[in-house]
Image: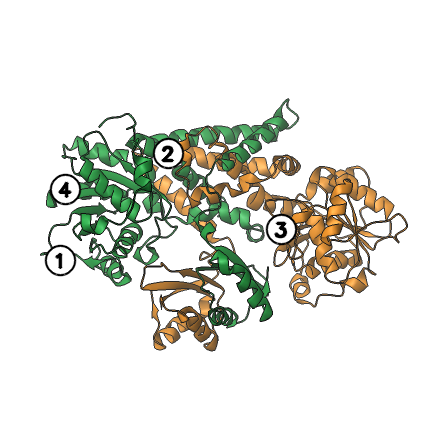
Chain colours: A green, B orange
Amino acid sequence: MNEQRISTPGIARRNEAGRGALAARTRGAVHVIGAGLLGASVGLGLRGRGVEVTLEDLSPTTVALAADYGAGRVRAADDPAPALVVVATPPDVVADVIERALATYPDAVVTDVASVKLAPFAELTRRGVDLTNYVGSHPMAGRERGGAIMARADLFKARPWIVCRDEETPADALSLVEAVALDLGGVLMEMTPEEHDRSVGLVSHLPQVVSSLLAARLVPAAEQAIGLAGAGLRDTTRIAESDPELWVQILGANREPVVEMLDAFGADLAAFADALRDPEHAGAKRRIADLLAAGNRGVARIPGKHGSSERFAKINVLVDDRPGELARLLTELGELGINMEDLRLEHSPGAQIGFAEIAVLPEVAERAVSDLVERGWRTL
Amino acid sequence: MNEQRISTPGIARRNEAGRGALAARTRGAVHVIGAGLLGASVGLGLRGRGVEVTLEDLSPTTVALAADYGAGRVRAADDPAPALVVVATPPDVVADVIERALATYPDAVVTDVASVKLAPFAELTRRGVDLTNYVGSHPMAGRERGGAIMARADLFKARPWIVCRDEETPADALSLVEAVALDLGGVLMEMTPEEHDRSVGLVSHLPQVVSSLLAARLVPAAEQAIGLAGAGLRDTTRIAESDPELWVQILGANREPVVEMLDAFGADLAAFADALRDPEHAGAKRRIADLLAAGNRGVARIPGKHGSSERFAKINVLVDDRPGELARLLTELGELGINMEDLRLEHSPGAQIGFAEIAVLPEVAERAVSDLVERGWRTL
């Protein structure tokens, strides 16, 4: 493994290049091991592009659900060998499964979608596994809840998809994995495993720990305090719903960068608390203001701050808290020919009304609002 | 000031009681001092209910903008004295403005909407100001951006509105302030100033600091790392966009509870980092998992959080991806007399089925599932 960053002069061009040749390239056979959220989303997306997908999972229930869901068919013993294997198992077994896939399908390219890249690579290297046919990758996509039933064909759309390779990776293997990423709508990026792990440590693992620990402070809180929670608390703690078992694995596999970042964050926190504790101390207020302003600058660096949901316009409709009211709203939307792309229901404690946030295509938003108002609905 | 919690047997009834008598009660005159987001929203909402609103702000530009926006008219020197004054200035001047309002309009009830309650109350008491006509309050509402132009008449709708009073507060003054809160759609809560400040410290001030410091870690980060940012980072850092100047004031005014919470959070963070640093140490993995699981429990306590409130039972119903299916499900729920408390819809464009996660009162969950299954719905 070359520890340096691989220069990638062609990546922009490859991101630009046409998509869709995957079905031919894979000769119709991609095998997905691990039929959870990511595996089922890969299967769903590839099938939508005419690729034949077979599925495998330790759990018969999981694989059957994913197949019912449309993510592929359960792999049979006499199926021909796949051209590509996508390993989408939990991180703690990913090295084992990659090793087994390389041995079982010696002519296939094997990739994985695990969220930590250095540890499995180092483990496979330590075991002396021939990694010629392996190209590690990581689509930056996920949801708070896992499972095939949460899968989406468009889960990877416009999301970064990191591919890790070294100088010995055959061009064919690399381009096959890149074709999958591109066909699923991902944006290709190339990084070394070290760069990858440090980057996701910052943008994913540190926020996860911070969010979880913030939410943990709510456990002993008084009921009346929790009752005051607003959007700020909800947003900052949303990812604290994540699966602890999965995150023990992820954080354990990326502990060096994460510990370093937790220490740096902890030092900022202590400095902030000290300045607030003794606000008359020289420069204390200035330090508080500086740290808050640094937060402004940091958040401003995040690209696409408002997210991929920007594809849709949001309509907020007030809905009386009575059985049948939301059904009536959705029925009327259907009558108006408005296709609902997504729906969120907001409901405050004690309120007699809630509101439905309905995502629609931007070009129909204005008409939807005026038609709904005309029918007596109140919009925000 | 009575430091104990005031018992409020009548609050539920008052929240239930009819609204709208405010215009008569105020004899048509509410004066709002400070014409920013909150002041202009109060004005806009009250005018919509037939109340005459006058406005005042240190900045002629601000007050003119708010008046143009429809929040009220600029107060003239010969206007009759108001029945109620709402102080909606920045926190650092709120005590001064309350003192001045009480002196200028000795027959008026004075309230404020500042987000910290103990510090101004203590300051006014220290100055010997007669607080008989003062009732502090705090609507838990806001937006990331301030200013009259962001004002909304429904800003307070279904949001908690805390009223702080003591045993000497005249019933008339209290009920006038409560009438404003109710007429603007707020949900009344009563707390002592101490309870209030500790509660908002937890659900608002601590998350603000944590979010700002997390975002501040992005300032020195590599561009390629930031490029990987996803919804998790965006959500956890959204409130880091807040105005540093305002937050220096808020945090300074509530520093004792906030420092205490920052210290407790910092201790959790250090314990987490230590466990991750030395994962082979006895119990380290267990400690990591426990803290992450505590995060799950904490976020589950937040009311109105999609799919997480423990007050409700969850039913997962598979919905075929055909137009009208969800409306049919909700219609049938209505027919069954099942009130839906929350709804989360999951569907993927390529998938053959989606599912609706429906929150209902625990006592009806079992019947809801069996009735739905009887009608041919599939549940998870």
Residue, x 28% and y 47% (percent of image)? A19
Q: Nearer the viewer, mark 3 or mark 2?
A: 2
Tag shown at residue A76: 1
Name the residue that disc number 2 marks: A199
Disc 1 marks a residue whose amino acid type is Ala
How far is the residue under mark 4 from the one under mark 1? Answer: 18 Å
Disc 3 marks a residue whose amino acid type is Ala
Above or below, A124 against B364 in this view is above
Q: Position of residue A167 (x, y in %)?
A: 21, 29
Let me know if marks 3 and 2 both belong to one chain.
no
Tag shown at residue A339: none
Tag shown at residue A102: 4
Q: Nearer the viewer, residue B91 or B132?
A: B91
How far is the residue under mark 3 from the one under mark 2? Answer: 35 Å
10 Å crowding of disc 3: few (<14), some (14-19), many (20+): many
Disc 4 marks a residue whose amino acid type is Leu
Let me know if marks 1 and 3 both belong to one chain.
no
Chain letter, disc 2 residue: A
**Element type where label 3 sits in the image:** loop
Let me know if marks 4 and 3 both belong to one chain.
no
Chain letter, disc 4 residue: A
How far is the residue under mark 2 from the one under mark 1? Answer: 39 Å
Chain letter, disc 1 residue: A
Is residue A86 at all visible to an observer of this figure? yes
Query: Is residue B121 found left or right of A3 in the rendered image?
Result: right
